[in-house]
Amino acid sequence: MPPSTVLVIPAYQEAERVGTVVREVRALGIGIDIVVIDDGSPDETAKAARAAGAMVVSHPYNLGYGSALHTGYCFAWRSNYERVLQMDADGQHDATMLARLIAGLDQGADVVLGSRYLDDKAPPSSLARRVGTRLFAAIASGWIGTRITDPTSGFQGLSRDALESVVNDGFPEDYPDTDVLVEHHRRGLKLVEVPVRMHARTGGLSMHRGARIAYYAYKMFLTLLLLPVRRPTPLRNRDTVARWT
């Protein structure tokens, strides 16, 4: 019997796109559950996701991309799923590429990172975004000891061991990217990249845009500098976080 798997889709104001994403995944017939984390959307994101056949967990108000992912992880942990897949709700991630994430997990990886830079031509992005991606890819590669080309990719697969490492109070509420990959490595987990196809954005807003790119760079550098001395809170353990989320 294949391992129980849930696909986590964080979503904010994606009523026009999330239903299509869910239906495309269901049409694959790969036997996975789907949960959409509605991050306090003022539109009908939750309604569209349910109508397409997904489970929905809703935040009462907008908490940020990282918080939505964390809620999905805690849902998966509490529900005893053996592994987690994650993709965005805006249609950029090609649902047919989920099979490559699953194959990576089947081959023993704990974290499978879908990279837009290993196969087909990546969708267009701003110069600042491309420079930032290359910079943090170099940092991640040097720290982890293996080549990482797409550290900001939200198209990932996690084993149960990797899921255990993210169900805690220290998970970033805004930009869970390079720092989370480095933390996986520090915990002794096996990371691999696989080539995936991604599409150009057709709507919605990127969280890596405008002045946010500068803030992202500042936040990521600061977080990476503090990683060696960072300690988990002694006040709440993993199971408490998962139960309260």
Image (cartoon, helix red, strand yellow):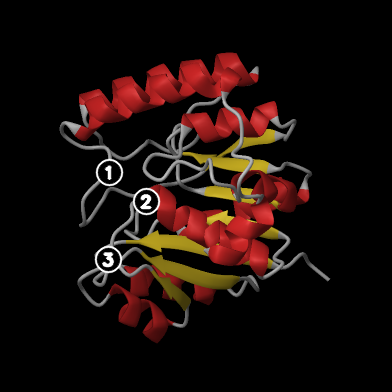
The reply to whether dot 1 and dot 3 touch (C-beta < 8 Å) is: no
How packed mark 2 is, by other alpha carbons closer than 10 Å (few <14, some 14-19, many 20 or more), is many
Image-based side of 210 in relation to 218, left or right:
left
The picture quadrant where one finds residue 107 is: top right
In-front residue for pair 49/27: 49
Q: Position of residue 159 (x, y in %)?
A: 70, 50
Residue at x 26%, y 68% (from the top left corner) = 41
Image-based side of 226 in relation to 186, left or right:
left
Is tag 2's residue or tag 1's residue first in the polypeptide sequence?
2
Q: Is residue 62 above or below residue 49?
A: above
The reply to whether dot 3 and dot 2 touch (C-beta < 8 Å) is: no
> How far apart are labels 3 and 2 at the CA level?
13 Å
The picture quadrant where one finds residue 18 is: bottom left
In the picture of the structure, the residue carrying the numbered disc 1 is: 207
Q: Secondary structure at mark 2?
A: helix
Please say whether residue 87 is visible from this viewpoint. Answer: no
Q: Position of residue 26 (x, y in %)?
A: 52, 75
Outermost residue, right side: 1
> How far apart are labels 1 and 3 at the CA level?
14 Å
Q: Secondary structure at mark 1?
A: loop
Image-based side of 185 in relation to 227, left or right:
right
In-front residue for pair 43/120: 43
In the picture of the structure, the residue carrying the numbered disc 2 is: 65
Is tag 1's residue or tag 3's residue first in the polypeptide sequence?
3
How packed mark 3 is, by other alpha carbons closer than 10 Å (few <14, some 14-19, many 20 or more), is many
Residue at x 65%, y 42% (from the top left corner) = 111
Outermost residue, left side: 210
Which residue type does callout 1 highlight? Met
